[in-house]
Image: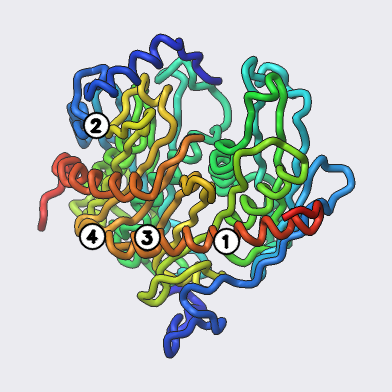
Amino acid sequence: MYDLIAEIKRDNIIQTLKAGKRVDNRGFDEYRPIAVEVGVGEKAEGSAIVQIGKTRVMAGVKLAIGEPFPDMPNSGVLTTNAELRPLASPTFEKGPPGEDTIELARVVDRGIRESECIDLEKLCRVEGEEVWIVFIDLHILDYDGNLFDACELGAISALVDTRLPKVEDGMIIYKEKTDERLPIKDLPVETTFAKIGDNIVVDPILDEEQVMDARLTVAYTKKGDICAMQKGGVGTFTEKEILEVIDRGLEKSKELRKHIPFKEV
Amino acid sequence: MKVGEPERLIIDGKRLDGRAFDELRPIKIEAGVLKRADGSAYLEWGGNKVMAACYGPREVHPRHLARPDSAILRCIYNMAAFSVSDRKRPGPDRRSVEISKVTREALEHVVFTHLFPRTAIDVFIEILQANAGTRCSGITAASVALADAGIPMADLVPACAAGKVGGEIVLDLNDVEDNYGEADLPVAITPKKGEVTLLQMDGNFTREEFEKAFKLAIKGCKKVHKIQKEALRKKYGGT
């Protein structure tokens, strides 16, 4: 289901950008206020609520013990899932996940996986037989644009917050959490820019997303390397614009990373 | 280390299949290969075998999806169960749903959808044999199928990937390189204007490596574009 956009709204957003401003008075490279709270779900091994402006996402990490993939016998397993719940927007529908949901989950997954932020080999319990399986679930609670960045921030914050449960005779006792944390090696963040007409702005609100031509999400490691990218939308970027977005995003990624509640050990 | 990982992916400045870093695998495209489809194309790209078909503009079902001011473009990317070593369970999985979406977004920009309001243009991509780079193969073949169907378009859309393998930036990864390489960057462009319509990436690039790989991928797209045009010329003549 798509929202019909009034032409007047589209014109207003584009004209405002042409004048060098945004409809909510932010700068082109300015994020909305960001808040991250962890430990918000007791039954989850790790959890976080992330707010970027009015967009709100809850992330939960659950752990299980299972078999590794045959081609990676000494490696833990990571899965990421997103739920665009109908409570978060009149355009989200119940039922099986649509392509937007799947794309979101897969792009967040790529940022987490490709940055190798979890040392999956340390999650091996018995080689070829028993490993930790890490489930990251992202619940969208309120949708005002830029789910990619909010979900990536939620996912990594919940992972950082995760404490392993006690295990006895191969059985997990979920009620008893240990002090052991996940082996976190990196802190990836994603930054998303929207191209609207000839202008490119960070952290689009819903109104901007609805009129944008295309968006570009880039995931960065702590070192500043690029570990995942995804262009979306029917519009296009030029070569120059893509390189520009990467450089602008790198600066923003440093800001975003400060919101991850991670203490160096 | 993954099971079956080769010790080195680059030996004496060459790739395991003997290619230079900026060398494409052999590509063969034939336009108009299916009787029933309005347009079609068959593509072989290294070990990939891909069939693409285009139907439309035609009536939209279900009807509520129709747009009053333009055609809708729908793309379905599907892998045959026997296209990969471990049988793929038939039907859409999360990966194919995502690839279908980015394929549509890669192609839609060039299609003059506003000429056919209230209709659907359907593109079907079947991967019959897979050997890394299937999404680029699919987009490349689908673009030829759209042209073969006579759909008005601003340009063809060629696609090609570059990546990092054994520390080197290389063009058009094969399956070993894709499985054990460090990064993969599929790109699609509109050659006339040089706009990027598909861009995905996973792995690890420094900023410099990315720029090098990105430019290499665009070069690859331009080579693929030539082969697309040849396929259409072969069927329809002209220069």
Q: Amino acid at mark 4?
A: Lys
Front position among marks 4 and 3: 4
Rendered location of residue B171, percent (x, y): 49, 68
In the rendered structure, the residue with mark 4 lies on which chain?
Answer: A
Q: In percent of the image, x 72 and y 24: which residue is there?
A: B119
Badge 4 is on which residue? A185
Residue located at (60% from left, 72% from top): B25
User: Quadrant of the rendered structure where residue B151 is?
Assistant: top right
User: Tag 3 or tag 2, which sits nearer the N-term?
Assistant: 2
The percent position of residue A190, horizontal first and vertical second, equals: 30, 44
Q: Find disc 3 in the rendering and name its residue.
A: A169
CB atoms of marks 3 and 1 within 8 Å? no
Crowding around mark 1 (Cα neighbors within 10 Å: few <14, some 14 to 19, many 20+) is: many
Q: Quadrant of the C terminus of chain A?
A: bottom left
Q: Residue at x 71, y 58 (%)?
A: B50
Q: Is residue A222 visible?
A: yes
Give the distance between the C-alpha atoms of the residues marked 4 and 3, in whole angstroms.
Answer: 29 Å
Which residue has dot 2 on it?
Answer: A40
In this rendered view, identify the residue nearer to me: B122 or A127.
B122
- Measured from the top left, where is residue A90 in percent x and y? 46, 15
A65, A37: nearer the viewer: A37
The quarter of the rendered structure image containing the N terminus of chain A is top right
